[in-house]
Amino acid sequence: MHCEMLEKLNTLETRYNELERLMAEQAMEYEAVAGYARERSELEPVVEKYREYRETQRRLEDARSLLSDGSDMAELAGAEIAELEPRLATLEAEIKTLLLPKDPRDNKNVIMEIRAGTGGDEAGIFAADLFRMYHRYAEGRGWRVETLSSNETGVGGLKEVIFEVKGRGAYSRLKYESGVHRVQRVPVTESQGRIHTSTATVAVLAEVEEVEIEIPERDVQLDTFKSAGAGGQNVQKNMTAVRLTHLPTGMVITCQDERSLLQNKERAWSILRARLYEMEAARRQAEQAADRRSQVGSGERAEKIRTYNYPQSRVTDHRIGVSSHNLPAVMDGGLDQFIDELAMREQVERLAEA
């Protein structure tokens, strides 16, 4: 391990020890302690791994000394060296991964948007299936899902649904789901048993706080109207629905699922902030000539990140060439096999660049 990395690790360990001291000294200052605890929990994985690395290195040096002395313990020392050397290399690789710059959005809640693409009514049904899939995935990880806006079709599908997933690390996992998803199956609307191909687009946006992006009120036109969605007579009679138009970009956000004007307004602003933040992030990365995956593409069948083939009970992620032959389990929220592989390959690429 080179000197710069060791120096950085020593600095992190010093800070970790300082945080433990501060937490003990200011135990009654709950707000301060909570801040120290958050910082400490972020440092803990790399500090623990570094301490294990040092202990392994110490044991390895002791074993090498015994081997070079030619003592009666030489055979035992040789066996320990054979065990410790690969472990030390593994720990170093793990530490390098932990030291990679974190995406500041990784621990944020996410706003997800699913829209029916090519395929008519079947595309809307598939969009609803994806919504259920993500709902199940979130439930399995203890996250909470709140629907912000939805537009249903007459056959049990969704033209569009926007929802928020709340939970630590939600963005770090769900960010890989952005893109075009393709389904191949016999639709319920098909009378002759023919297999159709349809698509739905998924966009994943990190939730953005008001302080993170400034949107001048003069740039936004606010309109209110009567809700056309569910909610009973109270919603239908009152002006509770909200439409925000971002004048510089022409972006339009509509929210009408809540019973109050204030709730719909807050949700519309939340979606607008997330979309504008994502646009700005994309612009910066483009300026730096960074390779950035398109969020949703155009929804055409050829632009796909994943295919769900019902006749063969197969789900294939085309970015990594990984397939599952248990489609029902995937649709029930079993996405980790894809997300784990995508996360690992991203880390490998970032390590290579570093």
Image: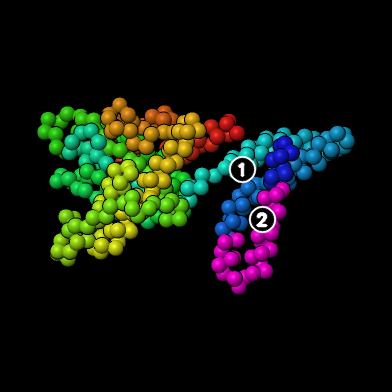
Residue furthest to the top in view is 302
Label at residue 16: 2
- The quadrant in which the C terminus is found is top right
Residue 52 visible from this viewpoint:
no
Q: Is residue 242 at least partly visible in the picture?
A: yes
Of the image marks 2 and 1, the number of the one nearer the N terminus: 2
Residue 13 falls inside the magenta stretch: yes
Q: Is residue 279 above or below residue 169?
A: above
Which residue occupies 20% across, 33% down? 119
Identify which residue, 93 or 119, lies in the foreground.
119
Point out residue 88 in the picture as x, y percentages from the top left corner. 69, 38
Q: In this rendering, would 304 be left or right of 91? A: left
| Residue in the picture at 77% in, 34% down | 78
Q: Quadrant of residue 225?
A: bottom left
**Is label 2 in a helix, a strand or a loop?**
helix
Which residue, as the protein is rendered here, is positioned at the far front? 218
| Disc 1 secondary structure class | helix
- Give residue 281's position: percent from left, percent from top: 44, 41
Q: Which residue is mark 1?
A: 99
Task: Tell me which corner region of the image, top left, top right, bottom left or bottom right, holds residue 33.
Answer: bottom right
- Within 10 Å of disc 1 (Cα), the crowding (few <14, some 14-19, many 20+) is some
Going by the image, does 189 lie left or right of 163?
A: left
- Magenta stretch: give its range: 10-36
Residue with the most extreme left position: 191
